[in-house]
Image (cartoon, rainbow, N blue to C red):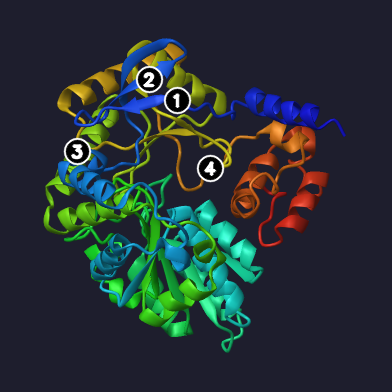
Amino acid sequence: MKYETFFRTELDRLRAEGRYRIFADLERHVGAFPNATHVNGRKRRRVTVWCSNDYLGMGQHPAVLAAMHEALDRCGAGAGGTRNIAGTNHYHVMLERELADLHGKESALLFTSGYVSNWASLATLASRIPKCVVVSDASNHASMIEGIRHSRAECRIFKHNDTADLRRVLREIDPDRPKLIAFESVYSMDGDIAPIAEICDIADEFGAMTYLDEVHAVGLYGPRGGGISDREGLSHRLTVIEGTLAKGFGVVGGYIAGSAALCDFIRSFASGFIFTTALPPSVAAGAVASIRHLKTSGLERAQQQRRVAQVRERLSELGLPHLENPSHIVPVMVNDAVMCKRVCDMLLERHDIYVQPINYPTVPVGTERLRLTPSPAHSDADIDQFISALDAVWTELGLDRTDTHGDDALPAIDMGVLRHGQLAAAAGHRALHHAPQFAAGLARAPALGGTAAQGPLARLLTKLFPRRAYGSVA
């Protein structure tokens, strides 16, 4: 095999499909978020960032920076090893105590990222608990999916946020088998929120543990920033709460919170915790300062919600299609990979606005979007500039201003994916989550026999996904 030829061919395919990802070289300006310098070769220019996950701007908060400077001067740059080998710094201990207190749990455990905390915790729980069955929401994050896959435990998928389907799936499982329901509070791409109370009720009914990913909610919701479960007074009902330090808290790292025995169990058996170098003490110190601030200050959360409401109102006034949801995430729907990238390129090149296009496999084919995250740091002038620029780009490209995207909308057919045999393989478990919806879109293609009830594609799809009939798709 000519390996380099293979690599280039696969990359060329991504470019042809509009799914090749280009990283913007950005230098953020402390004290001036959301402004940054975009570096392109020798050219440098000031841009406004509209897609940052530093949701509250805590990455530039004076208390966070001061704490990090102090810890850096006191402890040096790195942790010095894994937590087991000279790497447990007092700042790590303080941070875990703060996190346990934040979620009303006995204990907490730090990881190097939110991805790793999900991957390591789910993999350890599902693999070490005998005969455990993981019941996973269809829209769970890739880190959760990879952890479940790595465990090799049986996994059953329930329809996204559908408690009736969750109950159906649990009824089909031997009542004596251990069960773990894995789901998120705020889903990062559509911005919808899980019915946590109902899921906890069902978990109690079937004797299941619950694992809640609060990555896109910690810092942002609840009277002390403990997430949606904190806001709704449900933290005590959850077995595991997982979160990140990299979004609402503005630093980096991940964690879980739960009982002392559970956290000690993960600490003792999770390879993703045991065999990696600990977070630098300065990072832990910054996280402690951020969490402590947001436990007592609601100003950042309130201002963010005001900015989100302003952006939504302005988008609606101009008929720019965006998904309605109860969270801080504003998805502006383009529904075409090539056009989505073009919108983002034009905003950057002509208007000095940076937004990253979101495409497959992050979202299903045909649901490509801009994912806006208005922050407390965005000003009225920033919003005016962005809305004006997006309106102009939308008009020039002739994009539809009628939002026809809904729960029953089917994604467009990505023939490139089909030709390369990646219907369910492109993104592993996540592709399998999306595959029934994606397959229904494929079944609409006359050239593939999708309009006939007994067509070859319909028969194939029925075999792949027996619970859904594809021959009748209009």
Q: Quadrant of residue 9?
A: top right
Instruction: Select label 3 or label 1 by which is in front.
Output: 1
Q: Secondary structure at mark 1?
A: loop
Residue under label 1: 24
The residue lying furthest to the right in this view is: 1
Mark 3 or mark 4, which is nearer the start of the sequence?
4
For the residues marked 3 and 1, what is the alpha-carbon distance in whole angstroms?
A: 23 Å
The mark tally for this picture is: 4
Q: Residues within 10 Å of mark 3 (few under 14, many from 20)?
A: many
Residue under label 4: 362
- Report the amino acid beneath label 2: His
Mark 2 or mark 1, which is nearer the start of the sequence?
1
Query: As drawn, is 327 to the left or to the right of 127?
Result: left
Residue under label 3: 376
- Report the amino acid beneath label 4: Thr
Q: Which of these two is toward me, 393 or 219?
A: 219
For the residues marked 4 and 1, what is the alpha-carbon distance in whole angstroms?
A: 18 Å
Residue under label 2: 38
Relative vertical location of residue 96 with respect to residue 367 in this rendering, above or below: below
Residue 453 visible in the picture: no
Q: Residues within 10 Å of mark 1 (few under 14, many from 20)?
A: few
Q: Give yes or no for contact between labels 4 and 1 (Cβ–Cβ under 8 Å).
A: no
Q: Secondary structure at mark 2?
A: strand
Q: Residues within 10 Å of mark 2 (few under 14, many from 20)?
A: many
For the residues marked 2 and 3, what is the alpha-carbon distance in whole angstroms?
A: 22 Å
